[in-house]
Image (spheres, rainbow, N blue to C red):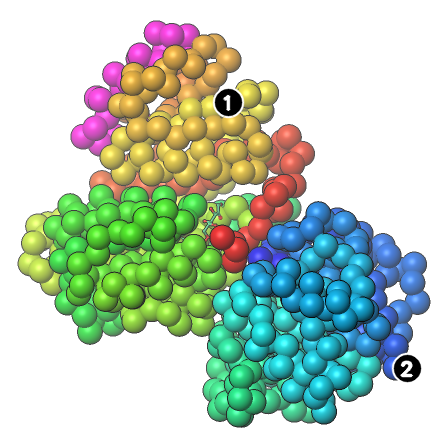
Amino acid sequence: MCGIIGYAGHRPAVPLIVEGLRRLEYRGYDSAGVATVQNKEIELVRAAGKLAALDEKLARKNVTNSTFGVGHTRWATHGVPVERNAHPHLDHEKNIAMIHNGIIENYQEIKTELLAKGYEFRSDTDSEVLCNLIAEGRKHNPNMLESISWALNQVEGAYAIAVVSIDEPGTVYAARVASPMVMGVGTGENFVASDIPAFLPYTREVVFIEDGELVKITSSSWEVFNVETLEPVEKEIKTINWDVQAAQKGGYKHFMIKEIFEQPKVISDCLAGRVDQAKNEIVLPEVEGMEPPERLHIIACGTSYHAGLWGKYLIEQWAKIPVEVEIASEFRYRDPLLAKGGVALAISQSGETADTLAGIKLAKEKGLSIIGLCNVVGSSVARESDYVMYTQAGPEISVASTKAMCSQLTALMLLALYWGKRKGVIDATTYSRAAQDMRSIPSILETALPAMRSRAQELSREYSEANSFFFLGRGLYFPLALEGALKLKEISYIHAEGYASGEMKHGPIALIDPKFPTFAMALNDELFPKVKSNLVEVQARGGEIIALTNPGVDLDVEHRWSLPEVWGPLNTFIALPALQLFAYETADYLGKDVDQPRNLAKSVTVE
Ligand code: F6R
């Protein structure tokens, strides 16, 4: 969590850093700050609240044109989100400014030692402790590089830090362990940041920083060292083909609605190069080198977990591989029984989710191979995995995940078909129908989305005053019901619960009354008659129903929402955006901060 950026170059640093923070604000937004150095003094500006509060403060101050500095947007871990806890932090003599993403686990012991040496602290944060430890290191070491290494070798926990000091104008240091960091290599300027969009307008040349590496950048040079030994580390520059536009709103009111509307393209991009059109065959070079697993453990969190639950249905049905799907934060602490030689599939949009990474570590220790299904290229999940399949959704900025899930479902479907075929267990008609029809989904969805949005608008106005919602589905639509409920609650703050339709009668139906609406997935599949009976039970208790269904389906509910019907499981790709649109329109109508819902952050890099 938290977004960090460091810059050393030829442009005025503060506006550039603030713009970079704007593109990182999805990582946390409870306070923000920047620090530069001018005339042997650190200039520090910080503000509680969103970046707009920092903008206002900067407009009132006369910041200098220093061409290097650091900036931070925070998601609180230690200390309440107020200005004194905002980053950058200064050491007690105000010679060093540091920004930090992560948690220093042994900060209390270090703080006690520093207090005994006369250090004073102005915040409640673990980060300020580390900044002062670097200052202490400066007393015993000839330069900043060695002081930072000295300090970092004493801390336990996770960090991505960037540091400037009055001692070394024009230089920014950065280091990471278990928190993301990338370096951008420009012409006459270099960058470090938590994520690529921060510096994308200036360079596409990227170096991925690994755990235990310490970086030194100036306007004209960059070097990477091993943090313990200070031996130089050889790094490779990679060119990223991300589009700057893709990291901007492109005329939409929010990133979330833009990302919902990007889903047709996301499906096409995820299929590109993976379906041989001439042979109507799935080709997955990413997992070609491995045998289809005998057993698969899917580990993920939140929306990615829901994608995993959906994937289980298809992988079991088509590839006949038993699949267990686990919430990563449970998996990591429950000492799971994992057979050596098995396979774990970690699903993560960001590739930086701490619980998912810990799940990968555990699975590796137990001898499993890891497939990483993630969106962010070069992310920690990608680097920790034996096989990586990128979902190709492009940058997802809105905190509520939409297009990433769509891409995960596409990739899971491809895996189910690919393994089914390789094992020779999938029925030939199903295989060719799925491989064929998947390719038409982008255009069908593209055509359907505007009308779906209008329907979502009508329904959201009618139900915006509801205090609670049920989301119901069976089979493949049960994970979608969970996802529909998650989307609605996280951005509109309306209480919502997702249930398997058949579970209602085992307790939850007691809650039904005329003011407790149900959003049901009643699509035209073999389970429809069962869903219909469950809905009749809800109606008998006075509950109102919105039902996602298909034309011609025999269903009598308050609100039918008819979606174009496609083949079999592919209907999921039409139903998912409907759920997302309903949540979006409701939250927007209620005036909520759609892209940055309260208490949340985009990538959850803490436990
Ligand atoms: C919900 C949402 C979260 C994430 C979860 C996992 O809209 O975005 O539930 O899905 O935090 O994140 P990743 O996929 O980055 O591991």
Q: For the magenta stretch, what is the residue range?
A: 522-543
Which callout, 2 or 1, points at the residue further toward the start of the chain?
A: 2
Residue 534 highlighted magenta (yes or no): yes
Residue plotted at (29% across, 52% down): 335
Residue located at (80% from left, 69% from top): 118
| Residue 20 seen from this side | no
> Is 25 or 103 nearer to us in this picture?
103
Indicate the secondary structure of the residue bearing disc 1: strand
To which quarter of the image does residue 165 belong?
bottom right
Residue 495 visible? The answer is: yes
- 346 vs 1, left or right, is left
Cβ atoms at labels 2 and 1 below 8 Å apart: no
**Residue designated by label 1:** 468
**Residue occupied by mark 2:** 39
The residue drawn where x is 52% and y is 71% is 177
550 to the left or right of 71: left
Instruction: Please provide percent x and percent y for residue 519.
Output: 41, 25
- Please give the label number shown on residue 40: none
Work out how far the residue at label 2 is from the one at label 1, CA to CA, in angstroms.
58 Å
